[in-house]
Amino acid sequence: MAAVDSLPRPAERAPTYRKVAPYLVDCDCHHLWHKIDEIFPYLPRQYVQEIKDFGSMFPNGGWTNMPNSHGYRTDHDVDEDTDFAEFTVKEHLDPYGFDVAILTGQMVYPTVGMTNLDYAAAICRAHNDWTMDHWVAKDSRFRATLAVGPNDPVLAVEEIERLGDHPAVVGVMLPAGGRHPYGNRIYHPIYEAAERYGLTIVTHFGGEGRGQTNPPTAAGFPTYYLEMRMARPQIAQAHTASLICEGVFEKFPTLTWVFVEVDTWWIPGLLNHFDADWKAVRDYTPWVKRLPSEYFRDHIRVGTQPMEQPGSREDLHWFLEQARADETLVYASDFPHWDWDSPTSVAPDFPAEMRANIFGETARAAFRL
Amino acid sequence: MTAAASDEVVVCPMAELPPGERCEVRGALTYGVTVFNLDGELYALLNHCPHRGGPLCRGRIRPHPVSDRVGYWEFEREGEILRCPFHNWEFDIRTGEALYDEKVRARTFPVEVRDGQVVVRVRGRRQVTR
């Protein structure tokens, strides 16, 4: 996809920190509103009135997070007058010298659990228009992922067709919570449209156990926030196994899938087992023509945050080798959340020869930047 | 004007640092140094988290929640625990120690009150660089 030359370009500023890689991409830069009123100009009149009368009716999960606005770090000096986009440029893009930040939203993940799919789609549409006007238009380094409602693939495809040609749109966001594992054929029209527009699918932890989505674990609902955080990798593993076994990457050979905020430690274990079992029982799914790990390496990328913290640097490097991190991992900050990883804080964790790929080149290829 | 040695930083007048408050000297030792007043006792910490480099001293001050049975909390050491804004680890303001990782400890400095001014001795102004 072409560079976004038509968008306003900020004055070149020297970063406060030494850039950790020549081309620096953040694959998980959250963007958010203060209040849902901000998308009213983009929302049908009936839904505006319903929100005024009843609230947004976003299904909730019931787990805690952090006390600041929407999980903003507690040291961030934000209030109701803060322009979050300008704040993100000033506190994040400029100081670290980012070349691109992929906007991953967060406010509308719960729409995956809504019963009313027209309402869910309308919220996603309004969110996308607001993203273009209030974020993408403000800095040429921002790239958008389109919020869509996966439970109505027809409406999801309409939204991709409405905005998929915009040069700043690089992906489609499918939150990890859903009604089916994402290899399921009901979703394939979304992947066909994404592939047609050269867009990457991004799956961020979110929406699990809310409203009509499945429980966050197959064992049932976690009770506590710490317990809930431990559910993330098994959800990603289930989606990964589904995508490969349902033949998604045979059917859509140029599709790339990026998981963010789902941990990374599971990659080697899953792929070792997956490859071994494929050799034994692949005859039940012969459309899976290659080793599962090959599909993974060709089509799936995983965000680094939260960065693994094993006991020693040696253990960490062993893991990175096992995960083929130089091919599969993409740097993700999770800015502005309290549990984020800054580029400078995690760069020393990676062997020097891996950094150019992890911090930029792998994402550049995955998102066609 | 308080006379300060080359390895000292004058933080603020003691009158501006009542119990429960903190005062930061931005840029001291690169990251900033913050003095906390805990019930009249002063403690100085480097504003740099030894875990992941966050601005530790701008975190929330909290008690230490403990429990001896599920669904029940007790709160100890009210006002003595600093939670880093990055990743929320708990630190003992008095010692700089991370409560739940014995290998991690924030840098601390001697602090005194001289001529009504809070003065931190930073041991030769060693620059911490990344």
Image (cartoon, coloured by chain):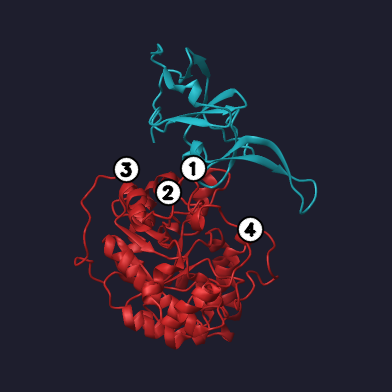
Q: Tell me, yes or no, whether dots 1 and 2 are on the same chain.
A: no
Q: CA distance from mark 1 to mark 2?
A: 9 Å
For label 1, the SS is loop
Q: Amino acid at mark 4?
A: Tyr
> If the image is split into quadrants, where does the N terminus of chain A sit?
bottom left
Disc 4 to disc 3, C-alpha distance:
35 Å
Instruction: State how far apart marks 4 and 2 are (Cα).
Output: 23 Å
Q: Position of residue B74 (x, y in %)?
A: 74, 43
Q: CA distance from mark 1 to mark 3?
A: 17 Å
**In the rendered structure, are the residues bearing label 1 and label 2 in contact, judged by CB atoms less than 8 Å apart?**
yes
- Residue nearest the viewer, comparing A250 with B23: B23
- Label 1 crowd bin: few (<14), some (14–19), many (20+), radius 10 Å: some
Dot 3, crowdedness within 10 Å: few (<14), some or many (≥20)?
Answer: few
| Left or right: A62, with A350 as reference point | right
Q: Which residue is mark 3?
A: A18
Q: Which residue is mark 4?
A: A225
Name the tint of chain A in the rendering.
Answer: red
Whether marks 4 and 3 lie on the same chain: yes
What chain is tagged by disc 4? A
Residue tagged 2: A342
Q: Which mark is residue B43?
A: none
Q: Quadrant of the C terminus of chain A?
A: bottom left
